[in-house]
Amino acid sequence: MSMERLKFYEPHKTEEDAMLAAKQHVEDHIWIEFDGMNCNDYLEDGQVACEGWDGEDHRCMCGNRRVSWEIEKNSDGTFYAVARAY
């Protein structure tokens, strides 16, 4: 999974703007993928696939991974938010 796909999405001038964009993306999509999402790698027959993270709870949909937001800075000084398992 590409980190570029997980950034929300265009660069933002402030950390707050990056966080607002990320939360808006979640509202539009309900479940999002996150960095470190490997929940479905070891599914056994009959198990339900993980849909991702809702942007608020501390665990992904299936409960396998703890997830939170991280704000990162691009080399040009702009910011982006990324959902990341920890």
Image: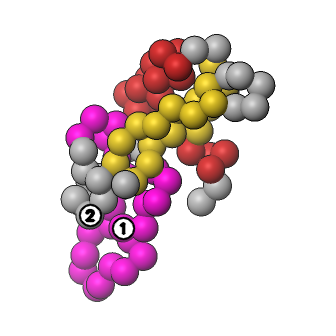
Q: Is residue 81 left or right of residue 60?
A: right
Position above or below: 13 against 22: above
Work out which residue is located at the far right of the displayed protein and give it. Answer: 76
In the picture of the structure, the residue carrying the numbered disc 2 is 64
* Labels 1 and 2 touching (C-beta < 8 A): yes
Q: Is residue 77 left or right of residue 69?
A: right
In the picture of the structure, the residue carrying the numbered disc 1 is 39
The first of marks 1 and 2 along the sequence is: 1
The dot on residue 76 is: none
Give the residue at x 39% y 54%: 85
Give the residue at x 39% y 71%: 40
The stretch in magenta equals 34-57
Give the residue at x 25% y 75%: 47
Position above or below: 28 against 68: above
On-image quarter of the N terminus:
bottom right
What type is the residue that disc 2 sits on?
Asn
Residue 13 place in picture, x, y as percent: 64, 14
Q: Is-magenta flag for residue 46? A: yes
> Which residue is at the front of the view, 63 or 73?
73
Position above or below: 80 against 54: above
